[in-house]
Amino acid sequence: MRILITGVPGWLGGRFLEILIKGFENEGPINDWKIRCLALDAIDLSFINNLSQYKKIEVILGDITKKDTLKNAVKDIDIIFHIVGIIHPKKIKELYQVNTLGTLNLISEAFYAGVKRFIHISSNSVAGTNLKRHILMKEEDEPMPYLNYGLSKYYAECIVKGFQESGKIETVILRPCWFYGPNQPKRQTKFFKMIQKGNPIVFGNGLNFRSMSYVDNTILAMILAVETKEAVGQTYWIADSRPYTTLEIYQTVAELLEVKNFKPKFLPNFSSEIFLMADKLFQSLGIYQTEIHVAGEMNKDIACSIDKARLELGYEPKIELREGMRRSIEWCRKQGLL
């Protein structure tokens, strides 16, 4: 089978490629798929080149925001894993250019090229936040996109579903949550360093729930989405087996980092709501500020049920918070980041 991956060497895309070639526990390739990657011309390809010593990887240069650059990428492809996306842009319009228009461009070309299945990596932001803390979000819930990022991913989901419903191409939509794991970007390392100092900020009492998605768990779901016939036309929440409280996440990382005097700074809930108001104002002006955006959502409950993925995909996440964070920290230390 011939596959195309977008989003390499990004966090999830890079780890996906690594696992396809080396296996989940470095046990060797998990299948005989022929791999092609779509990469921007300006991207450093050393990560892909290093993996090419184990298995041949074809690289096609292109840009999902420029439809005329995609024809060669989708030619003779059976399955597309559409991973690439932008979360923290410089300007709001970039969210729609990449997440929405980029998805339309790619799936359109995939249809014309006769691609069989399109695996679309979406986001928890499509659904927004939990209406009640102890009621987990499910796939059948009405979408409530969270600000512009959520809206850009929601529009992308609508596009993918439209192609499925018209019979043009088989699709599967996966909604991972807060990523963690090897190959993490600077923002996740910054999070670790904040906890390492011993006094990270917690908005509210820290008991709000967050679903998290260890990258290898997400990749397991991606593979199952290809192998499972019943997955066609479906949307699945993909996360660890249970949500964690913000305090549990922070304390787990602190313990693994061996923080001696861990004393979080608790700020009242309304302070996060003030950041959310500021975020909405800036975004209405086309401006995106990462720190303000993150502060505005850190007191929210964003937790989902993975029951549907378990039942229909046979998805059973193997890695939980402590082990996943241990591996994340170990990777950071090997890279000299911590």
Image (cartoon, rainbow, N blue to C red):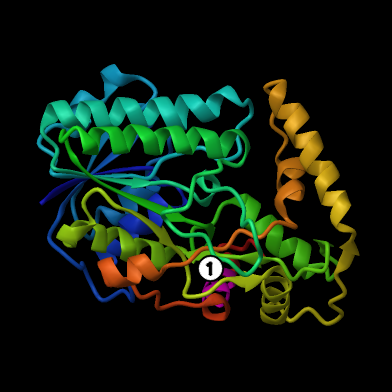
Between 257 and 277, the one lying in front of the other is 277
Is residue 154 rendered to the left or right of residue 22?
Answer: right
* In magenta segment, residue 104: no
Q: Residue at x 19, y 59 (%)?
A: 230
Q: Position of residue 256 (x, y in %)?
A: 66, 80
Chain part drawn in magenta? 324-330
Please count the marks in the image: 1
Amino acid type indicated by mark 1: Trp
Residue 60 occupies quadrant: top left
Q: Position of residue 196 (x, y in %)?
A: 77, 69
Callout 1 secondary element: helix
Q: Residue at x 57, y 52 (%)?
A: 185
* In magenta segment, residue 327: yes
Is residue 115 rendered to the left or right of residue 334?
Answer: left
Q: Position of residue 310 (x, y in %)?
A: 33, 72
Q: Residue at x 57, y 71 (%)?
A: 243
Between 153 and 40, the one lying in front of the other is 153
* 336 to 271, vertically: above or below: below
The quarter of the rendered structure image containing the C terminus is bottom right
Residue 220 occupies quadrant: bottom left
Between 215 and 232, the one lying in front of the other is 232
Q: Which residue is mark 1?
A: 331
* 305 to 13, vertically: above or below: below
Residue 61 occupies quadrant: top left
- For residue 23, say whether it is visible: no
Is residue 99 rendered to the left or right of residue 33?
Answer: right
